[in-house]
Image (spheres, helix red, strand yellow):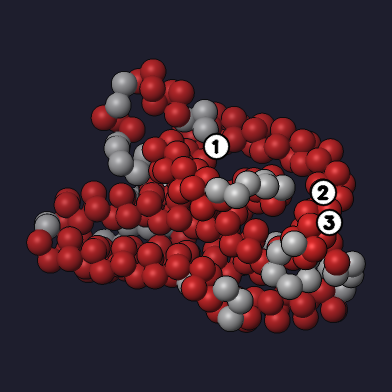
Amino acid sequence: MNYRVRYLWRQFLDQTGYFSKHNLTPLLLYVIGLVFLLGAMTFMGPEGSIRYLYTVVGLMASVWLFSMVVLNRNATFYKDSVVKVSYVPLYFRMLPTIIFQTFIFVIFIVLYSAFTALVVDDWLINIFSLLYYTVLGVILIIPFILLFLTVETPNLGKVNVAVFIVLVLAVPVLYLPESIPDVLENILSLNPFYYVVYGLQSNAVQLAWNIDRLPHDILFFSQVAFLYLWMLGFYSKMKFNLYQYSKKRQDA
Protein backbone atom coordinates (compact mmCIF):
# COMPACT_ATOMS: atom_id res chain seq x y z
CA MET A 1 0.00 0.00 0.00
CA ASN A 2 2.84 2.39 0.82
CA TYR A 3 4.27 2.27 -2.69
CA ARG A 4 0.86 3.18 -4.11
CA VAL A 5 0.57 6.16 -1.78
CA ARG A 6 4.08 7.25 -2.75
CA TYR A 7 3.20 6.79 -6.41
CA LEU A 8 0.04 8.88 -5.99
CA TRP A 9 1.88 11.66 -4.18
CA ARG A 10 4.75 11.71 -6.70
CA GLN A 11 2.42 11.76 -9.71
CA PHE A 12 0.29 14.49 -8.13
CA LEU A 13 3.35 16.72 -7.72
CA ASP A 14 4.52 15.90 -11.26
CA GLN A 15 1.25 17.00 -12.87
CA THR A 16 2.75 20.35 -13.84
CA GLY A 17 5.64 18.55 -15.57
CA TYR A 18 3.86 15.92 -17.67
CA PHE A 19 2.11 17.48 -20.64
CA SER A 20 2.36 20.80 -18.81
CA LYS A 21 0.70 22.72 -21.64
CA HIS A 22 -2.34 20.45 -21.47
CA ASN A 23 -2.44 19.96 -17.72
CA LEU A 24 -2.29 23.68 -17.02
CA THR A 25 -4.81 24.69 -19.69
CA PRO A 26 -7.75 24.32 -17.24
CA LEU A 27 -5.82 26.46 -14.75
CA LEU A 28 -5.41 29.15 -17.42
CA LEU A 29 -9.14 29.05 -18.13
CA TYR A 30 -9.93 29.35 -14.42
CA VAL A 31 -7.67 32.42 -14.24
CA ILE A 32 -9.38 33.96 -17.28
CA GLY A 33 -12.75 33.32 -15.63
CA LEU A 34 -11.51 35.11 -12.50
CA VAL A 35 -10.31 38.10 -14.55
CA PHE A 36 -13.69 38.40 -16.28
CA LEU A 37 -15.45 38.06 -12.94
CA LEU A 38 -13.40 40.93 -11.53
CA GLY A 39 -14.34 42.96 -14.61
CA ALA A 40 -18.01 42.14 -14.08
CA MET A 41 -17.75 43.26 -10.47
CA THR A 42 -16.37 46.60 -11.66
CA PHE A 43 -19.05 47.36 -14.24
CA MET A 44 -22.06 45.50 -12.81
CA GLY A 45 -23.89 45.76 -9.56
CA PRO A 46 -24.39 42.95 -7.02
CA GLU A 47 -27.16 41.32 -9.06
CA GLY A 48 -25.11 41.29 -12.25
CA SER A 49 -22.09 39.91 -10.41
CA ILE A 50 -24.15 37.04 -8.99
CA ARG A 51 -25.56 36.26 -12.44
CA TYR A 52 -22.05 36.25 -13.89
CA LEU A 53 -20.78 34.08 -11.04
CA TYR A 54 -23.50 31.54 -11.84
CA THR A 55 -22.39 31.39 -15.49
CA VAL A 56 -18.67 31.23 -14.74
CA VAL A 57 -19.09 28.41 -12.20
CA GLY A 58 -21.13 26.40 -14.70
CA LEU A 59 -18.60 26.89 -17.50
CA MET A 60 -15.63 26.08 -15.29
CA ALA A 61 -17.39 23.00 -13.91
CA SER A 62 -17.75 21.81 -17.53
CA VAL A 63 -14.03 22.50 -18.11
CA TRP A 64 -13.16 20.56 -14.94
CA LEU A 65 -15.21 17.48 -15.90
CA PHE A 66 -13.95 17.52 -19.48
CA SER A 67 -10.31 18.02 -18.48
CA MET A 68 -10.31 14.97 -16.22
CA VAL A 69 -11.37 12.81 -19.16
CA VAL A 70 -8.99 14.20 -21.80
CA LEU A 71 -5.93 14.60 -19.58
CA ASN A 72 -6.22 11.07 -18.24
CA ARG A 73 -5.98 9.81 -21.81
CA ASN A 74 -2.74 11.76 -22.23
CA ALA A 75 -1.36 10.31 -18.99
CA THR A 76 -2.36 6.78 -19.97
CA PHE A 77 -0.29 6.73 -23.14
CA TYR A 78 2.66 8.68 -21.81
CA LYS A 79 5.82 6.56 -21.97
CA ASP A 80 4.90 3.29 -20.21
CA SER A 81 1.23 2.51 -20.63
CA VAL A 82 -0.97 1.85 -17.63
CA VAL A 83 -1.14 -1.80 -18.51
CA LYS A 84 2.65 -2.08 -18.63
CA VAL A 85 3.07 -0.98 -15.02
CA SER A 86 1.62 -4.08 -13.43
CA TYR A 87 1.99 -2.98 -9.82
CA VAL A 88 -0.18 0.13 -10.33
CA PRO A 89 -3.81 -0.66 -11.24
CA LEU A 90 -5.49 1.25 -14.02
CA TYR A 91 -8.02 2.92 -11.72
CA PHE A 92 -5.19 4.06 -9.43
CA ARG A 93 -3.25 5.67 -12.27
CA MET A 94 -6.23 7.89 -13.03
CA LEU A 95 -6.24 9.40 -9.54
CA PRO A 96 -3.32 11.89 -9.81
CA THR A 97 -4.93 13.75 -12.71
CA ILE A 98 -8.36 13.62 -11.08
CA ILE A 99 -7.06 14.90 -7.73
CA PHE A 100 -4.90 17.62 -9.27
CA GLN A 101 -7.64 18.98 -11.54
CA THR A 102 -10.22 18.78 -8.75
CA PHE A 103 -7.91 20.57 -6.33
CA ILE A 104 -7.36 23.61 -8.56
CA PHE A 105 -11.05 23.64 -9.55
CA VAL A 106 -12.23 23.82 -5.92
CA ILE A 107 -9.65 26.50 -5.11
CA PHE A 108 -10.90 28.73 -7.91
CA ILE A 109 -14.57 28.19 -7.12
CA VAL A 110 -13.85 29.41 -3.59
CA LEU A 111 -11.91 32.37 -5.02
CA TYR A 112 -14.82 33.27 -7.31
CA SER A 113 -17.16 33.26 -4.34
CA ALA A 114 -14.74 35.22 -2.16
CA PHE A 115 -14.36 38.04 -4.68
CA THR A 116 -18.11 38.14 -5.33
CA ALA A 117 -18.69 38.39 -1.59
CA LEU A 118 -16.80 41.71 -1.65
CA VAL A 119 -19.52 43.16 -3.89
CA VAL A 120 -22.65 41.56 -2.46
CA ASP A 121 -21.38 41.79 1.12
CA ASP A 122 -22.34 38.19 1.79
CA TRP A 123 -20.61 34.80 1.65
CA LEU A 124 -22.74 32.90 -0.85
CA ILE A 125 -21.14 29.49 -1.18
CA ASN A 126 -21.73 26.56 1.15
CA ILE A 127 -18.46 24.63 1.51
CA PHE A 128 -20.11 21.33 2.43
CA SER A 129 -22.42 21.46 -0.59
CA LEU A 130 -19.44 22.39 -2.77
CA LEU A 131 -17.53 19.33 -1.58
CA TYR A 132 -20.66 17.17 -1.95
CA TYR A 133 -21.23 18.06 -5.61
CA THR A 134 -17.50 17.91 -6.33
CA VAL A 135 -17.26 14.36 -5.01
CA LEU A 136 -20.34 13.40 -7.05
CA GLY A 137 -18.69 14.89 -10.14
CA VAL A 138 -15.58 12.76 -9.60
CA ILE A 139 -17.67 9.63 -9.06
CA LEU A 140 -19.66 10.35 -12.21
CA ILE A 141 -16.70 11.05 -14.49
CA ILE A 142 -14.67 7.88 -13.78
CA PRO A 143 -16.70 5.55 -16.10
CA PHE A 144 -16.44 8.15 -18.88
CA ILE A 145 -12.68 8.34 -18.40
CA LEU A 146 -12.46 4.58 -18.86
CA LEU A 147 -14.71 4.72 -21.91
CA PHE A 148 -12.71 7.52 -23.52
CA LEU A 149 -9.47 5.56 -23.10
CA THR A 150 -10.78 3.03 -25.62
CA VAL A 151 -11.63 5.58 -28.32
CA GLU A 152 -9.48 5.13 -31.42
CA THR A 153 -9.83 7.81 -34.08
CA PRO A 154 -7.42 9.95 -36.12
CA ASN A 155 -9.70 12.94 -35.54
CA LEU A 156 -9.47 12.91 -31.76
CA GLY A 157 -9.02 16.68 -31.57
CA LYS A 158 -12.30 17.29 -33.40
CA VAL A 159 -14.02 14.70 -31.22
CA ASN A 160 -12.79 16.52 -28.11
CA VAL A 161 -14.17 19.85 -29.34
CA ALA A 162 -17.52 18.29 -30.28
CA VAL A 163 -17.85 16.54 -26.91
CA PHE A 164 -17.09 19.73 -25.01
CA ILE A 165 -19.64 21.73 -27.02
CA VAL A 166 -22.30 19.08 -26.37
CA LEU A 167 -21.44 19.09 -22.65
CA VAL A 168 -21.77 22.89 -22.40
CA LEU A 169 -25.09 22.84 -24.26
CA ALA A 170 -26.45 20.00 -22.11
CA VAL A 171 -25.89 21.83 -18.82
CA PRO A 172 -27.25 25.24 -17.73
CA VAL A 173 -24.27 27.39 -18.71
CA LEU A 174 -25.65 29.44 -21.61
CA TYR A 175 -29.15 29.60 -20.21
CA LEU A 176 -31.10 29.63 -16.96
CA PRO A 177 -33.28 26.57 -16.27
CA GLU A 178 -36.31 28.80 -15.72
CA SER A 179 -35.79 30.50 -19.11
CA ILE A 180 -36.39 27.35 -21.15
CA PRO A 181 -39.64 25.38 -21.63
CA ASP A 182 -40.52 23.05 -18.77
CA VAL A 183 -40.52 20.02 -21.07
CA LEU A 184 -36.98 20.76 -22.26
CA GLU A 185 -35.81 21.41 -18.73
CA ASN A 186 -37.24 18.08 -17.56
CA ILE A 187 -35.45 16.28 -20.38
CA LEU A 188 -32.13 18.02 -19.71
CA SER A 189 -32.41 17.35 -15.98
CA LEU A 190 -32.26 13.62 -16.70
CA ASN A 191 -28.63 14.17 -17.66
CA PRO A 192 -26.39 13.39 -14.64
CA PHE A 193 -23.93 16.08 -15.73
CA TYR A 194 -26.77 18.58 -15.53
CA TYR A 195 -27.32 17.54 -11.92
CA VAL A 196 -23.68 18.07 -10.92
CA VAL A 197 -23.12 21.34 -12.80
CA TYR A 198 -26.46 22.85 -11.78
CA GLY A 199 -25.81 21.82 -8.18
CA LEU A 200 -22.45 23.61 -8.20
CA GLN A 201 -24.00 26.68 -9.81
CA SER A 202 -26.91 26.84 -7.37
CA ASN A 203 -24.58 26.40 -4.44
CA ALA A 204 -22.40 29.25 -5.72
CA VAL A 205 -25.38 31.65 -5.52
CA GLN A 206 -26.45 30.59 -2.02
CA LEU A 207 -28.78 27.73 -2.94
CA ALA A 208 -27.12 24.86 -1.08
CA TRP A 209 -28.40 21.29 -1.09
CA ASN A 210 -31.76 20.85 0.59
CA ILE A 211 -34.35 18.12 1.02
CA ASP A 212 -36.27 19.32 -2.06
CA ARG A 213 -33.46 17.98 -4.20
CA LEU A 214 -33.81 14.45 -2.84
CA PRO A 215 -35.72 13.10 -5.91
CA HIS A 216 -32.92 14.39 -8.12
CA ASP A 217 -30.38 12.73 -5.81
CA ILE A 218 -32.19 9.40 -6.12
CA LEU A 219 -32.24 9.70 -9.93
CA PHE A 220 -28.55 10.62 -10.02
CA PHE A 221 -27.41 7.77 -7.79
CA SER A 222 -29.54 5.32 -9.79
CA GLN A 223 -27.84 6.46 -13.00
CA VAL A 224 -24.40 6.21 -11.42
CA ALA A 225 -25.19 2.71 -10.13
CA PHE A 226 -26.02 1.57 -13.67
CA LEU A 227 -22.84 3.20 -14.99
CA TYR A 228 -20.70 1.37 -12.46
CA LEU A 229 -22.41 -1.95 -13.12
CA TRP A 230 -21.56 -1.47 -16.78
CA MET A 231 -18.01 -0.43 -15.89
CA LEU A 232 -17.38 -3.55 -13.81
CA GLY A 233 -18.29 -5.73 -16.77
CA PHE A 234 -16.31 -3.58 -19.20
CA TYR A 235 -13.16 -3.10 -17.12
CA SER A 236 -11.36 -6.42 -17.76
CA LYS A 237 -12.00 -6.34 -21.50
CA MET A 238 -10.94 -2.72 -21.69
CA LYS A 239 -7.55 -3.38 -20.06
CA PHE A 240 -6.76 -5.95 -22.78
CA ASN A 241 -7.86 -3.52 -25.51
CA LEU A 242 -5.65 -0.81 -24.03
CA TYR A 243 -2.68 -3.15 -24.05
CA GLN A 244 -3.23 -3.96 -27.74
CA TYR A 245 -3.70 -0.29 -28.60
CA SER A 246 -0.55 0.67 -26.70
CA LYS A 247 1.46 -1.97 -28.59
CA LYS A 248 0.21 -0.61 -31.92
CA ARG A 249 1.23 2.92 -30.94
CA GLN A 250 4.73 1.74 -30.00
CA ASP A 251 5.16 -0.32 -33.18
CA ALA A 252 4.00 2.54 -35.43
Instruction: Work out which quarter of the rendered image holds the C terminus and state it.
Output: bottom right
| Amino acid at dot 2 | Asn
Report x, y in % for residue 74. 63, 63
SS at mark 2 in the image: helix
Within the image, what quadrant is residue 84 found in?
A: bottom right
The answer to whether marks 3 and 2 mark residues whose Cβ atoms lie closer than 8 Å is yes
Q: Mark 2 points at which residue?
A: 241
* Residues packed near mark 2 inside 10 Å, few (<14), some (14 to 19) or many (20 plus): some
Q: In whole angstroms, how far apart are the C-alphas of marks 3 and 2?
A: 5 Å
Report x, y in % for residue 46. 16, 56
**Closer to the N terminus: mark 3 or mark 1?**
1
Residue nearest the observer in this picture, 57 or 230: 230
Within the image, what quadrant is residue 175 found in?
A: top left
Q: Left or right: where does residue 161 sit relative to residue 204?
A: right
| Amino acid at dot 3 | Tyr
Q: Residue at x 59, y 35 (%)?
A: 220
SS at mark 3 in the image: helix
Report x, y in % for residue 32. 31, 67
Q: Mark 3 points at which residue?
A: 243
* Residues packed near mark 1 inside 10 Å, few (<14), some (14 to 19) or many (20 plus): many
Instruction: Work out which quarter of the rendered image holds the N terminus and state it.
Output: bottom right
Q: Mark 1 points at which residue?
A: 192
SS at mark 1 in the image: helix
Q: In whole angstroms, how far apart are the C-alphas of marks 3 and 1?
A: 30 Å
**Mark number displayed over residue 204:** none
Q: In whole angstroms, how far apart are the C-alphas of marks 1 and 2?
A: 27 Å
Residue nearest the observer in this picture, 130 or 137: 137
**Closer to the N terminus: mark 1 or mark 2?**
1
Does residue 88 appear in the picture of this structure?
yes
**Above or below for 43 versus 145:** below
